């Protein structure tokens, strides 16, 4: 990753921090985009930009700033997203719309805004889908439908960009995060996917080692 610029969205969340830290350790220049930039930045010398990625104009401007500051964008790791559990019967429309904005619109906006720069470098996009979106249980409709949209966007964009920009996605089961531990205190945390391990898979897909891989939806299950 020496000499490369890696953009990480949702970079101040659990997975985002792990990915940004590993990309920096591999020698990349890292740009951390998040709606909530926090003072405890885990990566020294990273560019940190506060941006609401549900807004295309703001996302385009953020990518322009990264390109201007580092001269290039080689990879975009689309991690910004969110989760809600709610049934259709008792759920609310606002939460449904929020899932599509946070998970699917951010992936579209980030890709759209970064593509002109990624075409210059024959770069890569790595999205985060969800294993739960392959076959959704009760209460998972809004979340799974929005992540299934990310899966289809990944496949379609990979076809559109074939030979120019690679587009893949990881489909995690359960990431070992503090909120998940609080929500499922009786679960066996050792079976969950560690953010650091998922980061390795994502950076492999972003790297030249995966130059022949595009359009892949890769389950990363841990031992769930
Ligand atoms: N945690 C899990 O078990 C799990 C499982 C499968 C998939 N995922 C997906 O993995 C990704 C990361 O999960 P996590 O647990 O690290 O989440 P997290 O909540 O810790 O991090 C998400 C980050 O995205 C940022 N964000 C939210 N909305 C944004 C917006 N509009 N613009 C810019 N940034 C925004 C948040 O501020 C936060 O820092 C998410 O896409 C999530 O849906 C998580």
Image: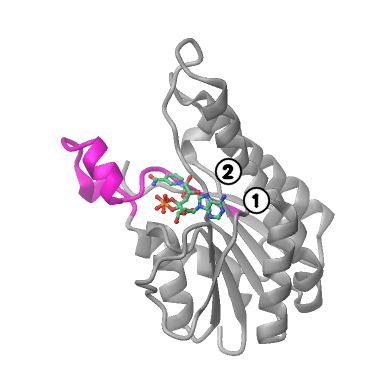
Relative to 193, 35 lies left or right: right
The quadrant the C terminus occupies is top left
Q: Residue at x 76, y 52 (%)?
A: 157
Q: Secondary structure at mark 2?
A: helix
Q: Verify CB contact (< 8 Å) between mark 1 and mark 2.
A: yes
Mark 1 → mark 2, Cα distance in angstroms = 7 Å
Residue matched to label 1: 107
Label 2, ligand 1: CB separation under 8 Å: yes
Q: Quadrant of residue 4?
A: bottom right
The quadrant the N terminus occupies is bottom right
Answer whether residue 172 is magenta in the image: yes
Residue matched to label 2: 103
Relative to 39, 189 lies left or right: left
- Nearest to the observer: residue 42 or residue 28: 42
Task: Look at the picture and state if 70 lies above or below 91.
Answer: below
Q: Secondary structure at mark 1?
A: helix
The span shown in magenta is 169-193
Q: Position of residue 72 (x, y in %)?
A: 71, 81
Question: What is the crowding at mark 2: few (fewer than 14 residues within 10 Å), some, or many (at least 20)?
Answer: many
Q: Quadrant of residue 174?
A: top left
Q: Position of residue 26 (x, y in %)?
A: 47, 83
Name the outermost residue toward the bottom: 3
Name the outermost residue toward the left: 186
Q: Position of residue 160 (x, y in %)?
A: 83, 54
Q: Residue at x 50, y 80 (%)?
A: 46
């Amino acid at each position: 990753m020496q000499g490369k610029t890696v953009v990480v969205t949702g970079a101040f969340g659990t997975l985002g921090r792990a990915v940004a830290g590993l990309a920096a350790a591999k020698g990349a220049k890292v740009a951390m985009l998040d709606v909530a930039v926090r003072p405890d930045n885990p990566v020294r010398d990273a560019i940190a930009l506060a941006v609401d990625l549900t807004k295309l104009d703001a996302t385009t401007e953020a990518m322009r700033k990264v390109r201007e500051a580092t001269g290039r964008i080689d990879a975009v790791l689309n991690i910004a997203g969110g989760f809600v559990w709610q049934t259709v019967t008792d759920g609310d429309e606002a939460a449904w719309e929020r899932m599509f904005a946070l998970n699917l619109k951010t992936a579209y906006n980030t890709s759209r805004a970064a593509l002109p720069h990624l075409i210059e470098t024959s770069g890569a996009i790595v999205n985060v889908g969800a294993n739960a979106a392959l076959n959704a249980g009760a209460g998972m409709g809004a979340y799974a439908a929005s992540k299934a949209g990310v899966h289809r966007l990944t496949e379609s964009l990979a076809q559109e960009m074939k030979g120019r920009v690679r587009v893949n996605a990881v489909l995690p089961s359960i990431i070992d995060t503090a909120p998940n531990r609080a929500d499922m205190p009786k679960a066996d945390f050792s079976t969950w996917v560690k953010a650091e391990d998922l980061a390795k898979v994502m950076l492999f897909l972003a790297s030249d080692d995966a130059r022949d891989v595009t359009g892949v939806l890769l389950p990363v299950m841990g031992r769930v």
